[in-house]
Amino acid sequence: MSQVFHTKEFANGLTLVSEPIADVASSAITISLPAGVRFDPEGRAGSASVLAEWSFRGAGGRDTRGLNDALDALGCQHHENVSSRHIVFSATQLGRNLPAVLEIFADILRRPALDDKTFAPSLDLIRQDLDALEDEPSRKAMMQLREKFYPHPLGRGIYGSAESLAVLSAEGLRQHAAACMSPAGAIVSVAGDFDWDRLDGLVGEHLGDWSVSAPTAGETRPPARGITHIPKDSAQVHIALAHPTVTVSDDQYYAARLAATVLSGGMSSRLFTEVREKRGLVYHVSTSYHSLKDHAGMFTYAGAAPAKAQETLEVTVGELRRVSEDLTEAELDKAKTQLKSSLVMRGESTAARAGAISADWYHLKRLRSLAEIARDVDAVKVEDVKAHLQQWPARDFVMLVIGPEPLDTSCLTL
Amino acid sequence: MEFKNTTLSNGLTVIAEVNPSAKSMAAGFFAKTGSRDETDEIAGVSHFLEHMMFKGTDRRGALEVNLEFDELGASYNAFTSEENTVYFAGVLPEFQTAMLDLLGDLLRPALRQEDFDMEKGVILDEIARYEDQPTFKMYERLMASHFRGHPLSRNVLGTPDSITALKRDDMQQYFDRRYSPGNVTLIGVGNIDWDAFVAKAGDTCSHWKPFDADRTLSPCGGSGLRIAVTDRKVNREHIGIMSPAPAAQDDSRFAAQLLSTIVGDSTGSRLYYALIDPAIADEAHTAYDMLDGTGGFLTFISTDPQRASQALEIALDEFKKIMDAGFSDAELQAAKNKIASAATLKGELPMGRLTAVGFDWVYRKEYMPLARQIETLFSVTADEVMTVAREFDLTKVTVLALGPLEEI
C-alpha cells in the first residue's frame, strides 16, 4: 500500500500534517495546542480541563447553542481532551464537511467567548469529573500513579484537586487562555477524505495569521515516586505499577514496544498466561507503554480479589522481570506479527491515523509510514530486546494500590 | 461491495459483505443465546460458557488456542449480552482460512473440568471488578427492575452464588440446548475470499448436529417502579431511567434511534441543554436498545447526590415536553447528520461492520448496505418520530438510582 503524507510548517509555529486515505468518506482532524496540564499555573491545576470545556461555550459571535448546533448540523462528533502537553480538540465528520468544521474550530481557537456566565458551569463539570473518579478506582489508580511517576508537573492529574479548582476564576482563566492557546508548537492533523491543496489553503486562511507567542513551560521538579496505599473498601484491590523506559524518539523504542507486546499483547502474552490463565488470579492484568516527549514508562495494572492480591503482585513483578532472561525467537516473531497487524488494522480508522501522525510529529518532527515502521519492527533481534530490558529493568517501581489493605512490597526491591 | 449468503446442510447460515478494497477481514459466530435463555439456577452460564469457548477443543488445548490467535496477529474477543453471544476475530486477509479454522473449532469446546474450575475464579473476579463500577451495577439493577418477572431481568454475569454452584455438566447441557447450527450465524466482512470462506466453514462446522433451539418471546411494558439503592461507599448518584421502545424487528427502529438522539445525545440534545450545559449533571445521555421482540430507551445520569432528584425531574420533564410539543426540523436534521456520520465512520472498519451486518441478520434475516441504511434514516419523517414518542410513551418510566441517597 502506498501512503502519502503532506506537511506544512507555518511561520507562526503551527504545523499541519495530513494523510489522505482512499476509499473512505470520513475525515478526522485533531488540533493539539500547547496548553496541557503541565502549563496549569502552580496551585491552579485543572485549568486546562476547565478551559477545554469552556472553549465550547460560544465562539466567533455564536453562543453555546449556536456553536453546538453548527457542529451538530455538520454531523460532527467532537471530543476535548487534556494531556500532559496539550489540549486536544478532535473531530470526525464526512470528508465534505471538513472545511466548514475547520472554520468553526478556528473561531473556537481564536475567538472563544469565555463569558463570565459560562465559567461557573464549566468549572462545575470538571469538579464533578473529579468527584466521579472516586467511583472509578482503576482509573483513579492509574491517574495518581502517573502523577507520582513523571517529574512534576508533567504527570499531573488533569482535573486538579478540590482546592486548586476552588481558586480558579473567569478572569484568571481568560489570562491563562491568552497565554496558552497559541499556534506556536500547535499541531493540526487531518486524515481521510480531503484535498490537500484546499486544506492547505483553508488552514492558511483561518490560522495562518494567528499570532501568539509560545507559552513558557515552567521548570520541572523530580517526581514524588514511592509506594502509596489508598484505603478503600472496594471489592477488588487495584494495583498500579510504573517503571521507566525509553521515549518514542529513542533507538530502543521498537525494542520497548515489542517487549510490551510479549508481556501483554493478546491472550498468549506472558502476563495473561501466567497471572490469569494458569493461576486464575485476576480478570484483568496488563502492561502498556506510555511516552511523554522526554520521559516514558511501562504502566502495569492488575485488579485482584483481596485474598489473591499479594500473589498477583508477586507473580506480575516476576513476569515483568523474567522476560529479560528467557525471551524466545518465537515469542519475538509473534510479537512482530501482532504489532504489524494491529498497525494495519488500526490504519483503517481515519481517527486513529489522525492521532498517529500528530503523535509522530510531536515526538519525531516527521511522519512514519506503516512500511517504515514494519521495517524497523522486523529489524529488532532478540538480543536487542534483552539488552534494552537489561538497561531498563523492571525495577525502581513507583506503585499505587487502592484497596482495603496495603500489600507487602518487598518483591519490588528484590 | 457484494452480499453473499448460503446455508450449510445442517442449518448453519453463512453470510458475508465482501469489500475487496478493505485492508483486513473480520469474521464472527453470532449465537442467538444469552442470559434471557437461562434459568435462575444457572444464571451466568452463557457468559461463563463464552469464556470456556477459548479454553480449547479436542484438537487444541487452552494455551494453544491463545497462541494460535496471537500468531495470526488477530484482533479477537467475544461478548455476551441478554440475547446474543458473539465470538469474533479480525485478521489480515492472508490469515482468513487459518483464523476460521481456529474460530470454528472453538465453537465445539471440550469444557475440561480443570479449565472450568480455574475459570470459575476468573468469572468471580470479573463480577468483583464490576462491583467497583457503580454505573454498571446501576444498569444491572435497572434492567432487573424494568423487566421484573421477564427473562430480560436476569444479569448477564450471574451472581457469586449461581456461579459458585454451577457445574460443568450444567454448562454442557446448556450448550447442547442452545448451540444448534440453526441458532448460530457465521458472518464475514471486509476483504474476504468468499469461496474459501464457505469451504472452510463447511470443513469446520458441517459436523455440528442440528436441533431445535427456540426462544419464547413475550412483551414487556416495564415495571414502572422507582427505586433507590443506597450505597454509602459510592460517591455520586448514578441514575438510570428506562421506558419501552420498538423491537429490533420493528420498522420504526430508525425513528426510535432518531428520537433517542434528539432527547439525549451527548451533544446538542434536550438533556444536554437541560442538564449538562448548566452542569446539573456531568453525564446525561439516552440510548436506544433494540432487543428480540421488545426494546428500551435507556437514560443514564450522573450527578451530585444533592442535585439528583432535581436532575431526575428535569429529565422526566424533557421527555414530557417532547411528547407534548415535539421538536424542530433543525433538531431532526442534526440527529440524522450525526447518526449518519457515526455510522459512516464505524462502517469504514471491518470490525465496525461486523456487528451491524450480524445483528441485521440475526434479528431480521436481512442485509442492508450502509448506503441504504443512511438513505432510510434520512427518509424518516418528523411524524414517524413523534409516533414512536407517543405510542411508546417516554414518560412511562422505571427508575433506578444507586448512590448515597435513600430515596429519589
Image: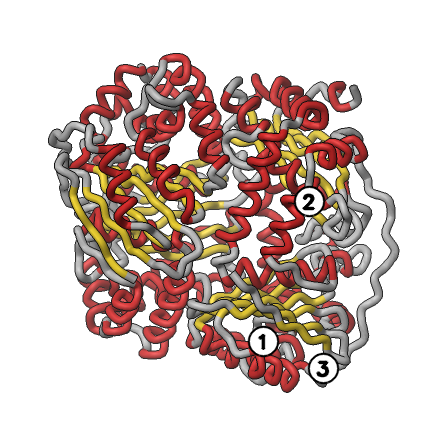
Q: Colour scheme of this structure image?
A: secondary structure
Q: Which one is nearer the viewer's eye here, B312 or B51?
A: B51
Give the mark nearest the N terminus, 3 or 2: 3
Q: Secondary structure at mark 1?
A: helix
Q: Residue A25: x, y in percent?
A: 42, 70
Identify the residue shown where x is 77% and y is 33%: A387
- Give neighbour class at mark 1: few <14, some 14-19, many 20+ (Cα, 10 Å): many
Do the residues at discs 2 and 1 belong to one chain?
yes
**Quarter occupied by residue B150:** top left
Per the image, the residue denoted by label 2 is: A254
Q: Tag 1, which chain?
A: A
- B283 horizontally vs B20: left or right: right
* Amino acid type, callout 2: Tyr
- A81 horizontally vs B234: left or right: right
Give the mark nearest the N terminus, 1 or 3: 1
Examine the rendered structure and indicate whether residue A338 appears above or below residue A92.
above
* Amino acid type, callout 1: Phe
**Quarter occupied by residue A378:** top right
Q: Tag 2, which chain?
A: A
Identify the residue shown where x is 71% and y is 48%: A291
- Give neighbour class at mark 3: few <14, some 14-19, many 20+ (Cα, 10 Å): some
Examine the rendered structure and indicate whether residue B112 appears above or below residue B282.
above
Per the image, the residue denoted by label 1 is: A105
Q: Are marks 2 and 1 in contact (CB under 8 Å)?
A: no
Q: Which one is nearer the viewer's eye here, A249 or A326?
A: A326
Per the image, the residue denoted by label 3 is: A210
Q: Tag 3, which chain?
A: A
State the separation of the CA atoms marked 2 and 1. 35 Å
State the separation of the CA atoms marked 1 and 3. 13 Å
* Amino acid type, callout 3: Trp
State the separation of the CA atoms marked 3 and 2. 37 Å
